Image (spheres, rainbow, N blue to C red):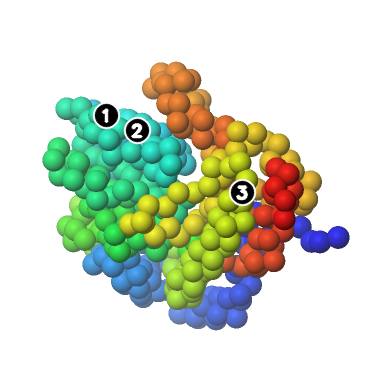
Amino acid sequence: MSSPIPFLDLKAINQRHRDALLQACERVIDSGWYVLGGEVSAFEAAFAQYCETPHCVGVANGLDALTLILLADGIGPGDEVLVPSNTYIATWLAVSAVGATPVPVEPDPLTYNIDPVAAAAAITSRTKAILAVHLYGQPADMQALAALAQAHGLRLYEDAAQGHGARCHGRRAGSLSDAAGFSFYPGKNLGALGDGGAVVTRDAALADRVRVLANYGSHIKYHNLVRGVNSRLDTLQAALLMTKLPSLDADNAHRHTVAQRYLDGLAACPLQLPHTPAWAESVWHVFVVGAPQRDALAAALKAADIGSLIHYPIPPHLQPAYADLGIPAGALPIAERMAQQVLSLPMGPTLSLQEVDRVIAVIRQHFGVGA
Ligand SMILES: *Cc1c(COP(=O)(O)O)cnc(C)c1O
Protein backbone atom coordinates (compact mmCIF):
# COMPACT_ATOMS: atom_id res chain seq x y z
CA MET A 1 0.00 0.00 0.00
CA SER A 2 1.54 3.33 -0.98
CA SER A 3 1.37 6.30 1.38
CA PRO A 4 -1.11 9.14 0.86
CA ILE A 5 -0.11 12.08 -1.34
CA PRO A 6 -1.33 15.30 0.27
CA PHE A 7 -2.35 18.26 -1.89
CA LEU A 8 0.37 20.33 -0.21
CA ASP A 9 2.74 19.20 2.55
CA LEU A 10 3.42 22.39 4.52
CA LYS A 11 5.16 20.53 7.32
CA ALA A 12 7.65 18.92 4.93
CA ILE A 13 8.25 22.29 3.25
CA ASN A 14 9.21 23.94 6.54
CA GLN A 15 11.05 20.95 8.00
CA ARG A 16 13.71 21.49 5.33
CA HIS A 17 14.51 24.81 7.01
CA ARG A 18 14.00 23.68 10.60
CA ASP A 19 17.43 24.58 12.01
CA ALA A 20 17.66 27.91 10.20
CA LEU A 21 14.10 28.83 11.23
CA LEU A 22 14.91 28.06 14.86
CA GLN A 23 18.03 30.19 14.63
CA ALA A 24 15.97 33.06 13.21
CA CYS A 25 13.53 32.74 16.12
CA GLU A 26 16.41 32.83 18.58
CA ARG A 27 17.82 35.91 16.88
CA VAL A 28 14.49 37.74 17.26
CA ILE A 29 13.91 36.56 20.83
CA ASP A 30 17.38 37.61 21.88
CA SER A 31 17.21 40.97 20.09
CA GLY A 32 14.44 42.30 22.35
CA TRP A 33 12.94 44.02 19.26
CA TYR A 34 9.56 42.54 18.26
CA VAL A 35 7.76 45.05 16.01
CA LEU A 36 9.29 46.46 12.77
CA GLY A 37 13.05 47.01 13.18
CA GLY A 38 16.03 45.57 11.34
CA GLU A 39 14.53 42.15 10.54
CA VAL A 40 11.64 43.77 8.69
CA SER A 41 13.73 46.29 6.80
CA ALA A 42 16.28 43.62 5.84
CA PHE A 43 13.52 41.41 4.42
CA GLU A 44 11.93 44.38 2.63
CA ALA A 45 15.25 45.15 0.94
CA ALA A 46 15.81 41.52 -0.04
CA PHE A 47 12.29 41.06 -1.38
CA ALA A 48 12.42 44.33 -3.35
CA GLN A 49 15.64 43.10 -4.95
CA TYR A 50 14.05 39.70 -5.66
CA CYS A 51 11.08 41.40 -7.39
CA GLU A 52 13.40 43.76 -9.27
CA THR A 53 11.54 46.77 -7.86
CA PRO A 54 13.07 49.65 -5.89
CA HIS A 55 10.60 49.63 -2.97
CA CYS A 56 8.99 47.06 -0.68
CA VAL A 57 6.80 47.68 2.36
CA GLY A 58 5.99 44.72 4.60
CA VAL A 59 2.36 44.53 5.72
CA ALA A 60 0.22 42.11 7.74
CA ASN A 61 -1.22 40.01 4.89
CA GLY A 62 -2.00 39.94 1.18
CA LEU A 63 -5.48 41.42 1.47
CA ASP A 64 -4.09 44.40 3.38
CA ALA A 65 -1.33 44.82 0.79
CA LEU A 66 -3.94 45.27 -1.96
CA THR A 67 -6.23 47.41 0.20
CA LEU A 68 -3.40 49.72 1.24
CA ILE A 69 -2.30 50.24 -2.38
CA LEU A 70 -5.81 51.37 -3.34
CA LEU A 71 -6.15 53.51 -0.21
CA ALA A 72 -2.75 55.13 -0.75
CA ASP A 73 -3.72 55.94 -4.34
CA GLY A 74 -6.93 57.63 -3.24
CA ILE A 75 -9.29 55.09 -4.79
CA GLY A 76 -12.62 55.10 -2.95
CA PRO A 77 -16.40 55.47 -3.12
CA GLY A 78 -17.75 56.07 -6.62
CA ASP A 79 -14.69 54.58 -8.28
CA GLU A 80 -14.67 51.35 -10.27
CA VAL A 81 -11.78 48.90 -10.34
CA LEU A 82 -11.62 46.14 -12.96
CA VAL A 83 -10.96 42.73 -11.38
CA PRO A 84 -10.98 39.18 -12.76
CA SER A 85 -14.32 37.37 -12.53
CA ASN A 86 -12.36 34.24 -11.53
CA THR A 87 -10.06 34.91 -8.61
CA TYR A 88 -9.76 34.37 -4.91
CA ILE A 89 -12.31 36.69 -3.31
CA ALA A 90 -9.56 38.76 -1.62
CA THR A 91 -8.97 40.57 -4.92
CA TRP A 92 -12.55 41.85 -4.84
CA LEU A 93 -12.55 42.44 -1.07
CA ALA A 94 -9.63 44.87 -1.33
CA VAL A 95 -11.65 47.00 -3.75
CA SER A 96 -14.71 46.83 -1.51
CA ALA A 97 -12.63 47.66 1.58
CA VAL A 98 -11.86 51.14 0.24
CA GLY A 99 -15.49 51.71 -0.73
CA ALA A 100 -14.91 51.32 -4.48
CA THR A 101 -16.81 48.90 -6.74
CA PRO A 102 -15.20 45.75 -8.15
CA VAL A 103 -16.19 45.35 -11.83
CA PRO A 104 -15.65 41.76 -12.97
CA VAL A 105 -13.92 41.01 -16.25
CA GLU A 106 -13.97 37.53 -17.75
CA PRO A 107 -10.71 35.63 -18.32
CA ASP A 108 -9.14 34.27 -21.46
CA PRO A 109 -10.49 30.69 -21.34
CA LEU A 110 -7.06 29.26 -22.23
CA THR A 111 -4.84 31.06 -19.70
CA TYR A 112 -7.58 31.73 -17.10
CA ASN A 113 -6.11 35.23 -16.69
CA ILE A 114 -7.99 38.51 -17.20
CA ASP A 115 -8.73 39.10 -20.90
CA PRO A 116 -7.41 42.53 -21.97
CA VAL A 117 -10.07 42.80 -24.71
CA ALA A 118 -12.87 42.15 -22.20
CA ALA A 119 -11.20 44.62 -19.83
CA ALA A 120 -11.29 47.33 -22.51
CA ALA A 121 -15.02 46.73 -22.98
CA ALA A 122 -15.65 47.12 -19.22
CA ILE A 123 -14.12 50.60 -18.90
CA THR A 124 -16.54 53.40 -17.95
CA SER A 125 -16.11 57.03 -16.94
CA ARG A 126 -15.80 55.81 -13.32
CA THR A 127 -13.03 53.29 -13.94
CA LYS A 128 -9.90 54.25 -12.02
CA ALA A 129 -7.73 51.15 -12.08
CA ILE A 130 -7.18 47.58 -13.22
CA LEU A 131 -6.25 45.01 -10.57
CA ALA A 132 -4.82 42.04 -12.46
CA VAL A 133 -4.12 38.68 -10.81
CA HIS A 134 -1.29 36.29 -11.69
CA LEU A 135 -3.70 33.41 -11.21
CA TYR A 136 -2.31 29.99 -10.37
CA GLY A 137 1.23 31.43 -10.61
CA GLN A 138 0.97 32.44 -14.27
CA PRO A 139 1.52 36.11 -15.08
CA ALA A 140 -1.40 38.03 -16.56
CA ASP A 141 -0.88 39.73 -19.94
CA MET A 142 0.61 42.82 -18.33
CA GLN A 143 1.93 44.27 -21.60
CA ALA A 144 -1.57 44.48 -23.09
CA LEU A 145 -3.03 45.70 -19.79
CA ALA A 146 -0.36 48.40 -19.45
CA ALA A 147 -1.17 49.68 -22.94
CA LEU A 148 -4.87 49.72 -22.04
CA ALA A 149 -4.23 51.50 -18.73
CA GLN A 150 -2.05 54.07 -20.43
CA ALA A 151 -4.59 54.73 -23.19
CA HIS A 152 -7.38 55.36 -20.65
CA GLY A 153 -5.36 57.05 -17.87
CA LEU A 154 -5.93 54.18 -15.43
CA ARG A 155 -3.71 52.87 -12.67
CA LEU A 156 -2.56 49.27 -13.09
CA TYR A 157 -1.90 46.96 -10.13
CA GLU A 158 -0.94 43.33 -9.64
CA ASP A 159 -2.43 40.89 -7.16
CA ALA A 160 0.78 38.84 -7.04
CA ALA A 161 -0.29 36.65 -4.10
CA GLN A 162 0.17 33.55 -6.28
CA GLY A 163 3.05 34.82 -8.40
CA HIS A 164 6.26 35.15 -6.37
CA GLY A 165 9.03 34.93 -8.96
CA ALA A 166 6.85 34.68 -12.09
CA ARG A 167 8.03 36.54 -15.18
CA CYS A 168 6.21 38.32 -17.99
CA HIS A 169 8.42 39.13 -21.02
CA GLY A 170 11.39 38.47 -18.74
CA ARG A 171 10.31 40.88 -16.01
CA ARG A 172 9.40 39.81 -12.53
CA ALA A 173 5.89 39.82 -11.09
CA GLY A 174 5.67 42.87 -8.87
CA SER A 175 7.63 45.04 -11.33
CA LEU A 176 4.96 45.03 -14.06
CA SER A 177 2.59 47.73 -12.81
CA ASP A 178 2.24 50.77 -10.57
CA ALA A 179 2.20 48.56 -7.46
CA ALA A 180 1.78 44.93 -6.50
CA GLY A 181 0.48 43.14 -3.43
CA PHE A 182 2.03 39.87 -2.26
CA SER A 183 0.84 37.40 0.36
CA PHE A 184 3.10 35.21 2.49
CA TYR A 185 0.23 33.01 3.71
CA PRO A 186 1.85 29.64 4.57
CA GLY A 187 0.65 27.88 1.39
CA LYS A 188 1.96 30.51 -1.06
CA ASN A 189 5.17 29.94 -3.06
CA LEU A 190 6.99 31.99 -0.42
CA GLY A 191 5.13 31.27 2.79
CA ALA A 192 5.60 32.49 6.35
CA LEU A 193 4.68 30.45 9.43
CA GLY A 194 1.66 32.65 9.89
CA ASP A 195 0.25 35.66 8.05
CA GLY A 196 2.34 38.18 6.15
CA GLY A 197 2.25 40.38 3.08
CA ALA A 198 4.10 43.06 1.14
CA VAL A 199 3.58 45.91 -1.28
CA VAL A 200 6.25 46.38 -3.93
CA THR A 201 6.38 49.37 -6.25
CA ARG A 202 8.66 51.53 -8.37
CA ASP A 203 6.81 54.62 -7.01
CA ALA A 204 8.70 55.97 -3.98
CA ALA A 205 5.87 58.31 -2.96
CA LEU A 206 3.30 55.50 -3.10
CA ALA A 207 5.58 53.24 -1.04
CA ASP A 208 5.89 55.99 1.54
CA ARG A 209 2.11 56.51 1.73
CA VAL A 210 1.56 52.75 2.18
CA ARG A 211 4.21 52.66 4.92
CA VAL A 212 2.58 55.54 6.78
CA LEU A 213 -0.97 54.15 6.39
CA ALA A 214 0.11 50.69 7.57
CA ASN A 215 1.65 52.11 10.74
CA TYR A 216 -1.19 54.16 12.28
CA GLY A 217 -0.72 56.96 9.77
CA SER A 218 2.58 57.78 11.38
CA HIS A 219 6.19 58.28 10.27
CA ILE A 220 7.36 59.30 13.69
CA LYS A 221 5.93 57.68 16.80
CA TYR A 222 2.93 59.62 18.19
CA HIS A 223 2.86 61.99 15.17
CA ASN A 224 -0.13 60.96 13.04
CA LEU A 225 -0.40 62.45 9.56
CA VAL A 226 -3.45 60.49 8.44
CA ARG A 227 -5.95 58.04 9.94
CA GLY A 228 -4.08 54.82 9.29
CA VAL A 229 -4.36 51.20 10.37
CA ASN A 230 -2.14 48.67 12.09
CA SER A 231 -0.96 46.37 9.32
CA ARG A 232 2.73 45.67 9.80
CA LEU A 233 4.71 42.64 8.70
CA ASP A 234 5.43 40.81 11.93
CA THR A 235 9.12 40.93 12.89
CA LEU A 236 9.32 37.21 13.62
CA GLN A 237 7.67 36.38 10.28
CA ALA A 238 10.11 38.70 8.49
CA ALA A 239 13.03 36.79 10.02
CA LEU A 240 11.48 33.46 8.98
CA LEU A 241 10.77 34.71 5.45
CA MET A 242 14.37 35.92 5.13
CA THR A 243 15.46 32.37 5.94
CA LYS A 244 13.25 30.91 3.21
CA LEU A 245 13.67 33.53 0.45
CA PRO A 246 17.02 32.14 -0.85
CA SER A 247 15.26 28.82 -1.67
CA LEU A 248 12.36 30.37 -3.60
CA ASP A 249 13.92 30.10 -7.06
CA ALA A 250 14.93 26.46 -6.53
CA ASP A 251 11.44 25.69 -5.18
CA ASN A 252 9.86 27.33 -8.23
CA ALA A 253 12.21 25.37 -10.52
CA HIS A 254 11.03 22.13 -8.89
CA ARG A 255 7.40 23.18 -9.38
CA HIS A 256 8.24 23.74 -13.04
CA THR A 257 9.69 20.21 -13.33
CA VAL A 258 6.56 18.78 -11.72
CA ALA A 259 4.32 20.80 -14.06
CA GLN A 260 6.22 19.62 -17.13
CA ARG A 261 5.86 16.01 -15.98
CA TYR A 262 2.10 16.46 -15.52
CA LEU A 263 1.81 18.12 -18.95
CA ASP A 264 3.63 15.22 -20.63
CA GLY A 265 1.97 12.47 -18.59
CA LEU A 266 -1.58 13.78 -18.96
CA ALA A 267 -1.40 14.86 -22.61
CA ALA A 268 -3.51 11.89 -23.78
CA CYS A 269 -6.26 12.48 -21.19
CA PRO A 270 -9.51 14.36 -21.97
CA LEU A 271 -8.53 17.32 -19.77
CA GLN A 272 -7.93 21.01 -20.30
CA LEU A 273 -4.26 21.33 -19.38
CA PRO A 274 -2.64 24.66 -18.40
CA HIS A 275 -1.69 26.86 -21.35
CA THR A 276 1.34 29.10 -20.90
CA PRO A 277 2.00 31.79 -23.54
CA ALA A 278 5.59 31.99 -24.81
CA TRP A 279 6.20 35.29 -22.96
CA ALA A 280 5.00 33.93 -19.62
CA GLU A 281 7.07 32.13 -16.99
CA SER A 282 4.67 30.58 -14.51
CA VAL A 283 5.72 29.65 -10.97
CA TRP A 284 3.00 26.99 -10.79
CA HIS A 285 1.44 28.03 -7.50
CA VAL A 286 -1.11 25.36 -8.34
CA PHE A 287 -1.45 22.96 -11.29
CA VAL A 288 -5.04 23.21 -12.50
CA VAL A 289 -6.75 20.88 -14.94
CA GLY A 290 -10.22 21.37 -16.41
CA ALA A 291 -12.49 18.33 -16.46
CA PRO A 292 -16.19 18.32 -17.46
CA GLN A 293 -16.74 15.47 -14.95
CA ARG A 294 -14.52 17.12 -12.33
CA ASP A 295 -16.11 15.59 -9.24
CA ALA A 296 -15.67 12.04 -10.56
CA LEU A 297 -11.97 12.77 -11.16
CA ALA A 298 -11.58 14.20 -7.64
CA ALA A 299 -13.29 11.08 -6.23
CA ALA A 300 -10.94 8.78 -8.18
CA LEU A 301 -7.95 10.64 -6.73
CA LYS A 302 -9.41 10.51 -3.23
CA ALA A 303 -9.97 6.76 -3.56
CA ALA A 304 -6.24 6.47 -4.32
CA ASP A 305 -5.37 8.61 -1.26
CA ILE A 306 -4.36 11.58 -3.40
CA GLY A 307 -5.36 15.09 -2.33
CA SER A 308 -6.80 17.71 -4.66
CA LEU A 309 -8.52 21.09 -4.23
CA ILE A 310 -10.81 23.38 -6.21
CA HIS A 311 -9.59 26.93 -6.92
CA TYR A 312 -12.34 28.13 -6.67
CA PRO A 313 -15.69 26.37 -6.25
CA ILE A 314 -17.86 29.55 -6.24
CA PRO A 315 -16.90 32.71 -8.17
CA PRO A 316 -17.08 35.95 -6.14
CA HIS A 317 -20.18 37.31 -7.92
CA LEU A 318 -22.20 34.25 -6.80
CA GLN A 319 -21.09 34.51 -3.16
CA PRO A 320 -23.66 35.83 -0.66
CA ALA A 321 -21.02 38.44 0.22
CA TYR A 322 -21.57 40.05 -3.20
CA ALA A 323 -25.33 39.48 -3.59
CA ASP A 324 -25.84 43.26 -3.40
CA LEU A 325 -24.02 43.75 -6.72
CA GLY A 326 -26.95 41.94 -8.31
CA ILE A 327 -24.88 40.02 -10.87
CA PRO A 328 -27.06 37.02 -11.79
CA ALA A 329 -25.94 33.44 -12.35
CA GLY A 330 -25.08 33.03 -16.02
CA ALA A 331 -23.73 36.59 -16.35
CA LEU A 332 -20.08 35.50 -16.19
CA PRO A 333 -20.11 32.13 -17.98
CA ILE A 334 -16.35 31.56 -18.19
CA ALA A 335 -15.83 32.07 -14.45
CA GLU A 336 -18.90 29.93 -13.73
CA ARG A 337 -17.72 27.10 -15.98
CA MET A 338 -14.28 27.19 -14.33
CA ALA A 339 -15.91 26.82 -10.91
CA GLN A 340 -17.62 23.67 -12.21
CA GLN A 341 -14.63 22.14 -13.97
CA VAL A 342 -11.27 23.11 -12.42
CA LEU A 343 -9.30 20.79 -10.16
CA SER A 344 -5.87 21.46 -8.65
CA LEU A 345 -3.53 18.46 -8.48
CA PRO A 346 -0.81 17.98 -5.84
CA MET A 347 1.97 20.53 -6.40
CA GLY A 348 4.81 21.79 -4.31
CA PRO A 349 8.56 21.98 -3.75
CA THR A 350 8.70 18.71 -1.79
CA LEU A 351 6.45 16.63 -4.05
CA SER A 352 8.61 13.80 -5.43
CA LEU A 353 8.58 12.81 -9.09
CA GLN A 354 7.55 9.30 -8.02
CA GLU A 355 4.50 10.85 -6.39
CA VAL A 356 3.78 12.85 -9.54
CA ASP A 357 3.98 9.65 -11.57
CA ARG A 358 1.50 7.98 -9.25
CA VAL A 359 -0.95 10.89 -9.64
CA ILE A 360 -0.54 10.66 -13.42
CA ALA A 361 -1.08 6.87 -13.39
CA VAL A 362 -4.30 7.18 -11.36
CA ILE A 363 -5.68 9.86 -13.69
CA ARG A 364 -4.74 7.90 -16.83
CA GLN A 365 -6.39 4.81 -15.39
CA HIS A 366 -9.49 6.85 -14.51
CA PHE A 367 -9.81 7.87 -18.16
CA GLY A 368 -8.82 4.43 -19.48
CA VAL A 369 -5.70 5.81 -21.15
CA GLY A 370 -3.13 3.02 -21.58
CA ALA A 371 0.34 3.13 -20.05
C1 LIG B 1 -3.88 34.39 -0.91
C2 LIG B 1 -4.44 35.41 -1.84
C3 LIG B 1 -4.76 36.70 -1.40
C4 LIG B 1 -4.81 37.10 0.05
O1 LIG B 1 -3.68 36.91 0.79
P1 LIG B 1 -3.80 36.81 2.40
O2 LIG B 1 -2.40 36.91 2.85
O3 LIG B 1 -4.44 35.51 2.71
O4 LIG B 1 -4.62 37.97 2.86
C5 LIG B 1 -5.15 37.64 -2.33
N1 LIG B 1 -5.26 37.31 -3.64
C6 LIG B 1 -4.99 36.06 -4.09
C7 LIG B 1 -5.13 35.80 -5.55
C8 LIG B 1 -4.59 35.07 -3.21
O5 LIG B 1 -4.33 33.84 -3.68
Residue at the (36%, 56%) spot, across then down: 278
In the rendered structure, which amino acid carries the disc numbered 2?
A: Val
Q: Residues within 10 Å of mark 3 (few under 14, many from 20)?
A: few
In the rendered structure, which amino acid carries the disc numbered 1?
A: Ala
Q: Residues within 10 Å of mark 2 (few under 14, many from 20)?
A: many
- Counting from the top left corner in percent of width and height, residue 288 is at 54, 47
- Counting from the top left corner in percent of width and height, residue 113 is at 39, 43
The reply to whether discs 3 and 1 touch (Cβ–Cβ < 8 Å) is no
Of the residues under marks 3 and 1, which one precedes in the sequence? Answer: 1
- Counting from the top left corner in percent of width and height, residue 275 is at 45, 49
Residue at the (66%, 60%) spot, across then down: 356
Which residue in the protein does label 2 denote? 105
Structural distance between the alpha carbons of marks 3 and 1? 38 Å
Q: How many marks?
A: 3
Residue at the (31%, 54%) spot, across then down: 180
Q: Nearer the viewer, residue 238 or 285?
A: 285
Structural distance between the alpha carbons of marks 2 and 1? 7 Å
**Quadrant (top left/top right/bottom left/bottom right) for the C terminus:** bottom right
The reply to whether discs 2 and 1 touch (Cβ–Cβ < 8 Å) is yes
In screen coordinates, is 44 left or right of 192?
Answer: left
Which residue in the protein does label 3 denote? 268
